[in-house]
C-alpha cells in the first residue's frame, strides 16, 4: 500500500506542484490549505508522513507540529519554511518536526527528503517509535535528543536503551533482571543498584517532581512501571 502523505500548504500553485510530484513518486497525497484543516487531518493519525507549510492562514505550522506531538502522533514531519533565518531550524526541531526545506525549494530534493524520512521511520516501526512525547517531554530515538527538566540534552546510549524499554512496554511492570538483560546485556558486573541509579537519573530528567514520580513508578518487590498517561 502506498504511503499516505498529508500536505498542508496555502499557496495553491505550490500545493499543486508538490502534490503532483509526490503522487508521481508513488505516494497517496491529501492536500489541504488551512491551519484548521491541517490540524484535524494530522491529529486523525491517518498519515505516514506530513509536509507542513510554516505560515498558514489561521495559524503557525509549528503549532500544528506541537499539537500533533502532544497527541502522540509520531509520523515524520517535514516543514516548508519561507524564511532562511538562523532560528528556524532550531524552532522546527524543538516543536517536533523531523526535517525542513527552505523555499524556494527544489521539488526532486523535497521528494528525496520525504523518502529518506519514511525509510528512517519504517526501519524503526518494529522497535520504539522515532519520537515519543509525554507531558512536556519528548525523546528522539534516532538521535538520542530529548527535552528534559534540564532543557534539551543528548541522552547516553544506556539511558536511551532504558527509556526505549519503558516506552515499548508502557504500563507493564519490568523487573530489574529484565532491564539488566535488555539494556546492559553482557556488560561487566551491573547490579540492581546500577538500574536504580539510572532510574533516579531518568526521574531527574523526566519527572515534574523527581521525588514524587508520576510516570516512572517503583512497584515494590517487582520492579519499575512506566505510565505515560501519569499515575493520577
Ligand atoms: Ca504559506
Image (spheres, grey):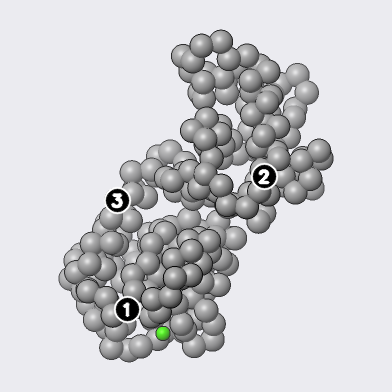
- Depth check: give the residue in front, 11 or 153: 153
Q: At 55% from the left edge and 72% from the top edge, which residue is drawn?
A: 63
**With respect to residue 196, does 98 lie above or below?**
below
Q: Residue 230 location in percent, x, y?
A: 72, 47
Asked whether mark 2 lies closer than 8 Å to ligand 1, one says no
Is 153 on the left-hand or right-hand side of 45? right
Q: Residues within 10 Å of mark 1 (few under 14, many from 20)?
A: few
Write down the residue under mark 2: 206
User: Quick check: 103 left or right of 37?
Assistant: left
SS for callout 2: helix
3 and 1 marks in contact (CB < 8 Å): no
Q: Which residue is mark 3?
A: 119
Q: Which x, y percent locates residue 68?
A: 53, 64
Which residue is disc 1 drawn over? 103
- Farthest residue, direction top: 189
Other-residue count near label 2 (Cα within 10 Å), few / some / many at <14 / 14–19 / ≥20: many
Measured in 3D between alpha carbons, the distance from the residue under mark 3 to the one under mark 1, in whole angstroms, is: 24 Å
Q: Say whether mark 1 is within 8 Å of ligand 1.
A: no
Q: Residue at x 41, y 63 (%)?
A: 77
Q: Is residue 46 visible?
A: no
> Which quadrant holds the N terminus?
bottom left
Q: Dot 3, crowdedness within 10 Å: few (<14), some or many (≥20)?
A: few
Disc with the residue nearer the chain's start (2 vs 1): 1
Identify the secondary structure beneath mark 3.
helix
In this rendering, is residue 102 above or below 228? Answer: below
Q: Is residue 54 left or right of residue 223?
A: left
| 47 vs 176, nearest the viewer | 176
Would you say the beta carbon of the disc 3 residue lies within 8 angstroms of ligand 1? no
Q: Residue at x 20, y 64 (%)?
A: 26
Percent of width and height locating residue 171: 64, 38
Residue 100 position by quadrant: bottom left
Amino acid at each position: 500500500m502506498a504511503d499516505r502523505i498529508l500536505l498542508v500548504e496555502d499557496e495553491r500553485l505550490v500545493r499543486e506542484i508538490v502534490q503532483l510530484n509526490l503522487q508521481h513518486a508513488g505516494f497517496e497525497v491529501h492536500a489541504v490549505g488551512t491551519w484548521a484543516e491541517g490540524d484535524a487531518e494530522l491529529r486523525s493519525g491517518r498519515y505516514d508522513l506530513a509536509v507542513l507549510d510554516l505560515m498558514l492562514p489561521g495559524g503557525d505550522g509549528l503549532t500544528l507540529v506541537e499539537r500533533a506531538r502532544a497527541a502522540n502522533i509520531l509520523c515524520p514531519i517535514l516543514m516548508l519554511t519561507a524564511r532562511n533565518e538562523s532560528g528556524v531550524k532550531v524552532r522546527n526541531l524543538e516543536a517536533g518536526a523531523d526535517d525542513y526545506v527552505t523555499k524556494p525549494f527544489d521539488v526532486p530534493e523535497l521528494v528525496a527528503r520525504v523518502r529518506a524520512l519514511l525509510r528512517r521511520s519504517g526501519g524503526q516501526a518494529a522497535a520504539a517509535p522515532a519520537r515519543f512525547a509525554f507531558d512536556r517531554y519528548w525523546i528522539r530515538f534516532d538521535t538520542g535528543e530529548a527535552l528534559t527538566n534540564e532543557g534539551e540534552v543528548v541522552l547516553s546510549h544506556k539511558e536511551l536503551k532504558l527509556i526505549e524499554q519503558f516506552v515499548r512496554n508502557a504500563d507493564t511492570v519490568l523487573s530489574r533482571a529484565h532491564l539488566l538483560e535488555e539494556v546492559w546485556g553482557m556488560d561487566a558486573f551491573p547490579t540492581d543498584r546500577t538500574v536504580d541509579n539510572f532510574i533516579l537519573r531518568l526521574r531527574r530528567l523526566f519527572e515534574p517532581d523527581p521525588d514524587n514520580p508520576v510516570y516512572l513508578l517503583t512497584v515494590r518487590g517487582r520492579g519499575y512501571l512506566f505510565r505515560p498517561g501519569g499515575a493520577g
